[in-house]
Amino acid sequence: MTALLRYQTDLLLRSQRWLAPVLLYAVFLGVGVRAGEPVLGALGYTAAALLPVTAWIVRICLGQEPSAARHVVAASAGRGRAHLAAVLAAVACAVLLGVVAVLGVTAMSDLRRVDPVEAATAGLLATAACVLTGAAVGALTTRPLVRSRGWSLAALVLGSLLALVTTGSPAQYAVTGLITGSRTATTPMPWLALAGALALAAAAAAVSTRATAWRE
């Protein structure tokens, strides 16, 4: 699996397709986060903006291989393992992006009435919940489950929106907790949201991976 992860990550970095979602995330943060604003609210926005970006990166990783290369990798390592490696590589890249963003936003925000370590920890947990929820959206809205590029993109956008606004969504729960904490000067630790997001991502990855056996 380690070799597959390196292969998928190398493909992503060399293709430079990661530039578009990363630049989109930078625009989100540049527009939505201001220096000196309450840290918890800023971290909530930072985590929420990463959800559609993660879904996009997962979509890129699952479709970046040429057909011939995908068949060769599948024959040598198994379709399921190759597919799962692509999802994990995308999640790892999104997590790295999220960690950098959380640390940067924490450093530039207003930390009065809030412990900086607790704020950063809450932000990292919420970011992880949003990354995993975004990975679930990305895995369910691209190949092999949705092959049409147009429908895949539409499903990704709609799924990301619903994941952020639907009551009961792990991402919505984590982000709302940070925003509410910003108003009450309390720092929530969204462990429950993280657990729910992990279960959702695992289920989505399992469904997507199993689908490779009968749709490709």
Image (cartoon, rainbow, N blue to C red):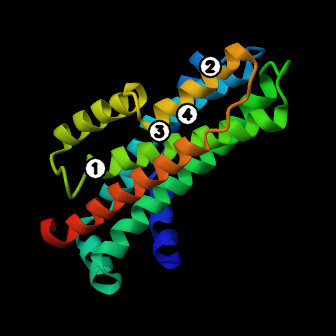
Compute the Cα span from label 1 to label 3: 16 Å
Q: Is residue 14 visible?
A: no
- Labels 1 & 2 near each other (Cβ < 8 A): no
Q: Residues within 10 Å of mark 4 (few under 14, many from 20)?
A: many
Name the amino acid type tagged 2.
Thr
Q: Earlier in the sequence, mark 4 or mark 1?
A: 1
Question: Mark number for residue 180?
Answer: 2
Name the amino acid type tagged 3.
Pro
User: Residue 205, percent across and down?
Assistant: 35, 60
User: Residue 203, percent across and down?
Assistant: 35, 57
Taking the spot 50% from the left edge, 54% from the top edge, the residue there is 91
The residue singled out by tag 3 in the image is 170
The residue singled out by tag 4 in the image is 174
Compute the Cα span from label 2 to label 3: 15 Å
Name the amino acid type tagged 1.
Leu
Question: Mark number for residue 140?
Answer: 1
